[in-house]
Amino acid sequence: MRQIRSAVGRLAGRLGPGNDHPVISTTCLLLAAALIAEYTARTATDASSTVSVQHLALVLVMLIGLIGGMFRPQWFLWMVLVGGEILLVMTLMITPLAISIICTGFLAYLNIRSGVIATGMLLVLLVAPAPPSSSRLLVSTLMHIALYCFPLVTGLLLHMMRQRDNDSYLLRRQQEHEDTARNLHDTISNDLAYLILRIDHAETEDMPADEHTYRRQLQDLRDAADRAMTHTHEVIDSLEEHPEQHPQSEPSEPRSTATFPLATTADHATVQQAELQSLIDDEETKLESLGFTGDNLLGELRRPLSPGMMRLLTGLLTELYANIAKHADPAEWYAVSISFDTEELHISVSDTITEHDGKLGLGSGLDRYRAIIEKAGGSFTIHTEQRHWQLDATIPNKP
């Protein structure tokens, strides 16, 4: 089936660039050839009843409509449908009947209202006066079988399938945009904010007395800038990759993405515990370099988290620590607590808002995680009283 669709697409591409309906275009071309073949055969066998100015004009109208339908089917197929119905009544040819049925299906596929109107036009032919004959009986039987259900129902089904595919595509694109925005915020934005905060912190301190301390500070700044550049390249690479061949990776990947097919459940949980502890240690070191002091508590992980839950948790923790660095007062105590039970993950953060908040960032990072957690059935609450800031989040931890 895929090879057939590819061949049809290539044929339609040769007919005209930018064609949105290659199957319709190819079908119109085949129907035009069939119409010419039957009319030529009828002319050769029964010229007296087939060859006339009216018949020839209707055939030309249908051919023009079929050619136009290859490029603008929503307009020209009406011409084909009307011409085919009139020619069918006058000559009882089989090809105009097939063309009318197929055009009705295509119009229903393109637009539901157009399909209903086209079906109504076809049903009018059932009461059209015509001399009784075996040909008329055959045509009437075929019309009874096909016209009542086939074109309209088939077109509607195809229209629904196309609409479903289009909705899925738009939803996938929206999800990709949201993932990219969150990835940019969780990596590049937070790295640059940390770099700015380190520079501001260095400006308020006295010049280091020894060269070693000075070089270490410069190295820390360079590491922060290097992380921002590395994340920038990763985002650019993810945007340039073909979505079908290289699906965009989820933001905030855990530090180790290796799989453990032979590891036991306890071993896997131990590895994830170590990854989370490593992340917390790194973030705590960053905060200490900015003058912060606080508590960082990580509960025991008794069973492993799913890959999606691990990504969500590491991304949320990274965002929470970046939020402390950007908005909390370094002179006040902060606390971060993560605990696990059989049903839920609990994250609690408290700090004191600085009196001179530089407002680094758009303030949208936590809103994105709130939407994700609440959509998953969890809770996400923030309480602010004077300068005290408290966050409590609960995430369902389903196996």
Image (tube, helix red, strand yellow):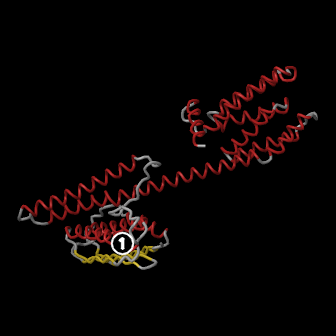
Against 307, residue 239 (above or below) is: above
Task: Give percent across and percent down for residue 241.
Answer: 40, 47
Seen from the viewer's position, the closer of residues 73 and 264 is 264
Left or right of residue 395: residue 48: right
Q: Disc 1 marks which residue?
A: 267
In the image, what residue occupies the spot 52% across and 52% down?
A: 170
In the image, what residue occupies the spot 60% across and 53% down?
A: 164
Seen from the viewer's position, the closer of residues 303 and 43 is 303
Quarter of image, res 187: bottom left
**What residue occupies the far right of the structure in this picture?**
132
Seen from the viewer's position, the closer of residues 65 and 328 is 65
Left or right of residue 375: residue 96: right
Seen from the viewer's position, the closer of residues 255 and 71 is 255
Left or right of residue 288: residue 271: right
Against 331, residue 48 (above or below) is: above
Q: Say which quadrant the N terminus sits in.
A: top right
Amino acid type of disc 1? Answer: Asp
Quarter of image, res 99: top right
In the image, what residue occupies the spot 70% across and 36% down?
A: 77
Task: Give percent across and percent down for residue 358.
Answer: 27, 64
Mark 1 residue element: helix
**Circle 1: is it few (<14), some (14-19), or many (20+) Cα within 10 Å?**
some
Against 39, residue 164 (above or below) is: below
Task: Give percent across and percent down for residue 44.
Answer: 82, 20
**What residue occupies the far front of the structure in this picture?**
262
Task: Give percent across and percent down for residue 19.
Answer: 57, 36
Left or right of residue 367: residue 28: right
